[in-house]
Amino acid sequence: MNCDLIVVGGGPAGMLSASTAAAKGLKVILLEKNDKLGKKLFITGKGRCNVTNYGDRDDFFHHVMTNPKFLYSAFKTFDNNDLLALLTSLGVPTKVERGNRVFPASDKSSDIIKALQKHMQLGNVCIKLQTEIKKILVKNHRVTGVLLHDDKQISAPKVILATGGMSYRQTGSTGDGYKMAQQLGHTIIEPKPALIPLITQEKWVKDLQGLTLKNVSVKAIINNKVQAEQFGEMIFTHFGVSGPIILSISSLIKKHIHPPTNKPIQISIDLKPALTDEQLDARLQRDFNKYSVKQLKNAFDDLLPKRMIATFLQLSGLDIHKQVNQISKKERDLLVHTLKGIPLTVTGTRPLNEAIVTSGGIHVKEINPSTMESKIVQGLYFAGEIIDVDALTGGYNLQIAFSTAYLSGLSAARV
């Protein structure tokens, strides 16, 4: 079997790179080891698929954590506006939500997958599911095709590797592409978790498991210096903390966690970031006047989630049974201090398999950023999460996948 281009991987990057090259006239075969396309894409955004972000160019690069400069050409060639125009042309209307996050109007990730499949069908891409490859075939530093697991060969002068990272292994992201690229001489930056829940030392978090806090501010503090700060939503878990702002914090401080340093990492949760200490004290005084004859444990219903009150008072060190009208100014200061900084100690992250994205992958110095072609093997291209680039939450990682995919498909179609 012969073709012009083989795309390995049927995720968002693989599907767009295949359809882009096919639209330029190439005979393209896409190989996917799963029984369906876009398995990881299907579960992104809790099934809603935060497909990109509506922010401008500066906003995009501000949110890229690893090797942003490498992506300049890819984003210039195919940015978020280009993606939205493509989706519209394929019959998928979108909507913009908080933080400029873009979702399909239907809230169904399956609509994005169907649109990408339609795009491939329009270009007559040959899709082969449940087809795994052993290695990429190379002669004289040029791609000649691929060897399948059943030892059959498919010949082609060009291959795009879009096999993803190593998180959510159940969706097929098992690091196969790293091994194939390494066999051909590429350097692999060690895959590590990014956008990952944090494990904390404190055991009281288990008591709050499942409790979501909204409109809070979280700081990561190392050596008494604030290394990262995020505002928004978080959730307590049986092992520590998670939620959008925690995931972003994890990527912002990942170099301090992997490999672990001897420097303790502290998390500080400001439950009332909109209020100064003075304003919060005034608020406490109003509530205490209202609940003056009650015990302290019954005076915070207007200020905190009910499940949070006992733990909060325990952290403040005050007697929960003390009468509110007996609370001193010094004790009130203690309460304000705790409200503005619930302390946690980070001891690590959840396993790589639970990460939203993988940090690490093909070394960008070995890829031409203007084409996504390997500098080591002619005719070999990369797209998506397999490359050592990653970003914060908000649709940026999928945009990276689409931008690098479009550029790789376009480049492969060039003579």
Image (spheres, rainbow, N blue to C red):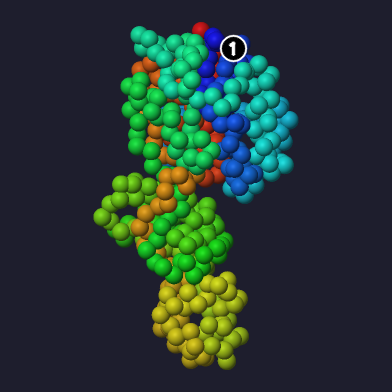
Q: Secondary structure at mark 1?
A: loop
Q: Which residue shows up at 62% across the image and 18% down it?
A: 125
- Residue type for callout 1: Lys
Position of residue 121 in the picture relative to residue 405 (left or right):
right
Q: Which residue shows up at 53% across the image and 14% down it?
A: 5
Residue 404 percent location from the top left of the image:
50, 27
Location of residue 45 (image quadrant): top right
Question: What quarter of the picture does the N terminus occupy?
Answer: top right
Answer above or below: position of 247 versus 143.
Answer: below
Q: Nearest the camera: 58 or 27?
A: 27
Location of residue 43 (image quadrant): top right
Q: Which residue shows up at 57% across the image and 17% down it?
A: 29
Answer above or below: position of 301 versus 252.
Answer: below
Q: Is residue 398 shown to the viewer in this render?
A: yes
Q: Which residue is mark 1?
A: 27
Residue 86 percent location from the top left of the image:
66, 27
Q: Which residue shows up at 57% across the image and 89% down it?
A: 294
Position of residue 178 in the picture relative to residue 288 (left or right):
left
Residue 98 percent location from the top left of the image:
62, 49
